[in-house]
Image (cartoon, rainbow, N blue to C red):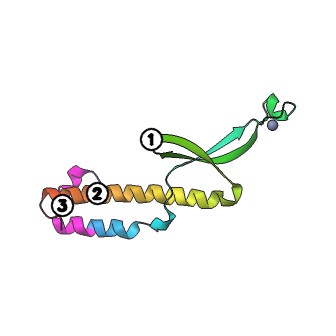
Amino acid sequence: MREVELSELSVAQLRARRRRLVGAVSDPERTLRGVLLHKERRCSSDGCHCRRGELHGPYSYLAIYAGGRSRTIYVPAAVEAACEAHVEGTQRNEELLLEISQINLELLRRRALE
Ligand SMILES: [Zn+2]
């Protein structure tokens, strides 16, 4: 919901909406920030079929941004599903937290931040 729409809600409605959003946040223990990528790769072997365009993979990587730079980390197949679930849950949680922050900003404007 956009801020202009939040401004049309009462303080009680804003707090009720915030409570619903908090209830939708999933286990923060599963937080994993990043973007899951699937890439095909060439290996270092000269005679390999990948030199003729038949690449290896796709393999999964997690692109992360930390300390002002980005890098990718290989994701083994055995943990790929778990990694994907963590990343998706984290993205949903961050959208929920953003919306909660917008509600709190609206409550602050009305001096109703408790
Ligand atoms: Zn190869």
Q: Examine the structure image and report whether residue 108 is included in the region drawn in magenta.
A: no
> What amino acid does circle 3 point to?
Leu
Indicate the quadrant where residue 51 lies: top right
| Residue topped by disc 1 | 68
Please state the horizontal and vertical placement of residue 46, each as a whole percent of the image: 84, 30
Query: Is most of the magenta stretch helix, strand or loop?
Result: helix
Q: Callout 1: few (<14), some (14-19), or many (20+) C-alpha neighbours within 10 Å?
A: few
Q: Label 2, on which residue?
A: 101
Residue 7: in magenta span: yes
In space, the residues marked 1 and 3 are separated at their CA atoms by 33 Å
Say which amino acid is labelled 2.
Ser
The residue at 48%/40% (across/down) is 69
Tally the marks: 3
Residue in the image at 14% along x and 56% along y: 109
Q: Which residue is drawn at 33% across and 69% down?
A: 20
Q: Would you say the beta carbon of the disc 1 residue lies within 8 angstroms of ligand 1?
A: no
Q: Quadrant of residue 50?
A: top right
84 vs 70: above or below? below
Q: Which of 85 and 73 is in front in this view?
A: 73
For numbered disc 3, what is the local secondary structure? helix
Residue 55 % position (x, y): 76, 36
Asked if the residue at tag 3 contacts the one at tag 2, i.e. Cβ–Cβ closer than 8 Å, the answer is no
Nearer the observer, disc 1 or disc 2? 1
Asked if the residue at tag 3 contacts the one at tag 1, i.e. Cβ–Cβ closer than 8 Å, the answer is no
Q: Horizontally, is 87 left or right of 44 in the view?
A: left
State which tag comes first along the sequence, 2 or 3: 2
